[in-house]
Amino acid sequence: MAAEEWQLDDFEIGKFIGEGKFGKVYLAREKQSGYVIALKVIFKKKKLEKYQFFGHLKREIEIQHSLDHPNVLRLFAWFHDETRVFLVLEYAAQVELYKLLNNLLRFSEKRAATYVASLAKALAYCHKKHVIHRDIKPENLLLDYEGRLKIADFGWAAQLQAHGKRQTMCGTIDYLAPEMVQNKAHDQTVDNWTLGILCYEFLYGVPPFEAEDKYDTFRRILKVDVVFPSSPLVSPEAKDLISKLLVKDSSKRLSLQKILEHPWIVQNADPSGCGF
């Protein structure tokens, strides 16, 4: 899909398929090649100017466009006119992961392990390129037509130089690492923490520190108040992995490579990353 400059006339616009805080997403087809994509439309005045988000969007585009991994949603190109910005994105044809989890209530250990392994591989790739995502959650995870997981929405992603740290508190409350709750500097290990949150949520159907009041959630995060209910039944190996990721001291969290080598992942994850 290489082109020096795209414009809206290059695409046949199909049905509306989703909406985020800053834009609407439509199914579209590139006229010349017939290639099906997702086209995200963001209004400059209504959204970007109102929220002073031009710099934020520029950084998001630069980061996502630089990434090329099977488990990261591709941003092929972008263009704009007087009133709108358009992002040409890979189309993930299946249901969003959060909808799938809501429908199934919880995932089998095989499915959960496969998704965690896919995320660990994708994040290892991102971290190698000095990118931290900082907002991994079911709403930002999509499935392609083969059922392969794709990380989407790099709105809170940041470039991090070697041994560097970031200070901005960002992300979603239930998935925040303790250092973010405390407004301390953080590094790529905030993504590792979030993998522990997701592993728990995949298996139990809810994030581990969920509470009615956000301050109770913050308190539970800081205490690392993880409770493993007796039902549904979850294997000791899965609990072990979760416990080694949800560690307050970020330097002691399990590395992404160690996640992939963990017995629970080795025994349960589908190497193909799809097929459900």
Image (cartoon, rainbow, N blue to C red):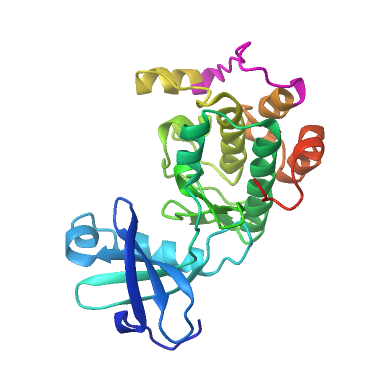
Q: Nearer the viewer, residue 142 or 262?
A: 142
Q: Is residue 226 magenta?
A: yes
Q: Nearer the viewer, residue 257 or 36?
A: 36
Question: Could you tell me if residue 137 is visible in this image?
Answer: no
Quarter of the view holding residue 261? top right
Quarter of the view holding residue 253? top right
Q: In the picture provided, is 84 more to the left or to the right than 165?
A: left
Q: In the picture provided, is 206 more to the left or to the right than 83?
A: right
Q: Position of residue 17 (x, y in %)?
A: 36, 56
Q: Position of residue 160 (x, y in %)?
A: 56, 56
Q: Position of residue 48 (x, y in %)?
A: 24, 61
Q: Position of residue 109 (x, y in %)?
A: 69, 31
Q: Main secondary structure of the magenta part?
A: loop
- The magenta segment is 221-237
Q: Is residue 63 magenta?
A: no
Image height of 91 relative to 190, above or below: below
Quarter of the view holding residue 39? bottom left
Image height of 233 relative to 62, above or below: above
Residue positioned 49% across, 18% down in the render:
220
Q: In the picture provided, is 48 more to the left or to the right than 206?
A: left
Image height of 98 relative to 230, above or below: below
